[in-house]
C-alpha cells in the first residue's frame, strides 16, 4: 500500500506532453516487455499494472486494439494516472462487446480525465459478457451526478460482482449519491457492495442514510471531506437505531456535524457495534 501511495503522490500533473505517436509507441514497448514483478509496473498475460505510464487516449486505443488482435484476456487492468479521457472509455466499451473483458476483476481508472462523458461511455461496457469488475477505481475524474446516473443505470449488471467502488475526489452531490443508493437497493443480487468510498465529494445531508442502508452487511462506507451536517447525521443515527444499517465501519471525518449530533451518532454506533470515525 505504501508503494501505491507514493506512486499516487508522484503522479504527473494533468497535462500530457507525450505526443499520440509516442503514446502508441509506449504501449507497444510496455506490451513487449512482459515481466512478472508487479510492485511498480508490470505486464503479464493477466495483469496490466500501468500506473502513470502516460499512455494517453492514443495509447489506450492501441492497447485495446492489441488485446483484440491477440485475443488476450486480462484480469487486472490498472491504468490510473494515464491522461485517459472519453476516447479511451469508448475503446473499452467497444472491446467489451467481444467478450474479451469478462475476466477483468480490477479496473483501475483513477486520476484520469474521464469526466461524466467518459463514465457514460464506460458504463456501456458494463453488460452481461462485457466488463463486470469486482473492484472499480474511478477516483479523481471530475465525475458528477450525471456520471453517477450512467453507473446507476448499469447496476443490475454490475451488482452481482461489484464489491468495492472508489469515487474519491470527484464532484458528486446528494443527487448523484441518491441515484447510486437507489440502484444498489433496487438490485439486491450478489454479495452486495462491501466498500464505497466517496471521500472528498460534495455530499450534503440527504444521501448519507440511504447510502448506509444500501451497502452490504459488514461493509464500509467512507464519506470523509463532504458537506454533511446535523440533518444528515441525525437521519443516519435514526436509521442505525431502527436496525437498518449493518455496516462494519462508517467514516465521516471532515464534515460539518455538531458535537451534539456526533455524540448521538457515536452512541447509536456503539449500540449497533459499528465502528465510527468522526475526527
Ligand atoms: C481530500 O482533501 C483533503 C483536504 O483538502 C486532502 O488532504 C486529501 O488528501 C484529499 N484526498 C483524500 C483521498 O482524502
Ligand atoms: C445540512 O443540514 C444542516 C442542518 O442540520 C444545515 O445547516 C446544512 O446547511 C445542511 N447542509 C447542506 C449541504 O445542505
Image (cartoon, helix red, strand yellow):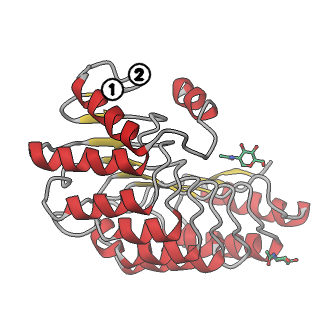
Instruction: Classify 59 as above or below 179.
Output: above
Foreground: 12 or 105? 12
Task: Identify which residue is drawn at 56% across, 70% down.
Answer: 211
User: Mark number for residue 39?
Assistant: 2
Instruction: Classify 174 as above or below 58.
Output: below
Mark 1 against mark 2, which lies toward the viewer? 1
Furthest-right residue in this view: 259
Mark 1 neighbour class, 10 Å CA radius: few under 14, some 14 to 19, many 20 or more? many
Instruction: Classify 126 as above or below 141.
Output: below
Image location (x, y in percent) of residue 217: 45, 60
Image location (x, y in percent) of residue 182: 48, 80
Q: Which residue is mark 1?
A: 42
Task: Identify which residue is drawn at 57% across, 76% down.
Answer: 145
Element class at badge 2:
loop
* Observer able to see residue 181: no
* Observer able to see residue 59: yes
Image quadrant of residue 176?
bottom right
Between the residue at mark 1 and the residue at mark 2, the CA separation in whole angstroms equals 8 Å
Q: In the rendered structure, are the residues bearing label 1 and label 2 in contact, judged by CB atoms less than 8 Å apart?
A: yes
Amino acid at each position: 500500500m505504501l508503494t501505491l501511495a507514493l506512486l499516487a503522490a508522484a503522479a504527473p500533473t494533468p497535462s500530457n506532453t507525450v505526443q499520440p505517436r509516442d503514446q502508441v509507441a509506449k504501449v507497444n514497448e510496455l506490451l513487449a516487455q512482459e515481466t512478472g514483478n508487479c510492485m511498480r509496473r508490470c505486464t503479464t498475460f493477466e495483469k496490466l499494472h500501468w500506473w502513470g505510464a502516460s499512455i494517453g487516449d492514443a495509447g489506450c486505443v492501441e492497447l485495446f486494439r492489441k488485446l483484440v488482435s491477440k485475443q488476450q484476456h486480462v484480469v487486472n487492468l490498472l491504468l490510473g494516472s494515464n491522461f485517459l479521457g472519453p476516447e479511451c472509455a469508448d475503446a473499452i466499451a467497444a472491446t467489451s462487446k467481444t467478450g474479451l473483458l469478462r475476466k477483468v476483476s480490477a479496473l483501475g481508472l483513477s486520476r484520469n480525465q474521464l469526466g461524466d462523458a467518459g463514465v457514460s461511455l464506460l458504463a456501456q461496457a458494463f453488460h452481461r459478457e462485457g466488463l463486470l469488475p469486482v473492484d472499480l477505481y474511478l477516483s479523481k475524474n471530475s465525475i458528477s451526478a450525471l456520471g453517477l446516473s450512467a453507473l446507476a443505470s448499469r447496476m443490475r449488471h454490475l451488482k452481482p460482482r461489484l464489491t468495492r467502488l472508489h469515487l474519491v475526489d470527484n464532484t458528486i452531490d446528494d443527487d448523484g449519491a441518491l441515484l447510486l443508493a437507489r440502484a444498489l437497493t433496487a438490485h439486491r443480487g450478489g454479495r452486495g457492495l462491501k466498500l464505497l468510498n466517496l471521500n472528498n465529494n460534495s455530499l450534503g445531508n440527504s444521501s448519507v442514510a440511504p447510502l448506509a442502508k444500501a451497502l452490504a452487511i459488514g461493509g464500509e462506507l467512507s464519506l470523509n471531506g463532504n458537506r454533511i451536517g446535523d440533518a444528515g447525521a441525525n437521519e443516519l443515527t435514526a436509521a442505525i437505531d431502527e436496525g437498518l444499517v449493518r455496516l462494519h465501519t462508517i467514516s465521516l471525518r471532515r464534515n460539518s456535524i455538531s458535537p451534539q449530533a456526533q455524540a448521538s451518532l457515536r452512541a447509536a454506533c456503539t449500540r449497533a457495534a459499528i465502528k465510527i470515525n468522526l475526527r
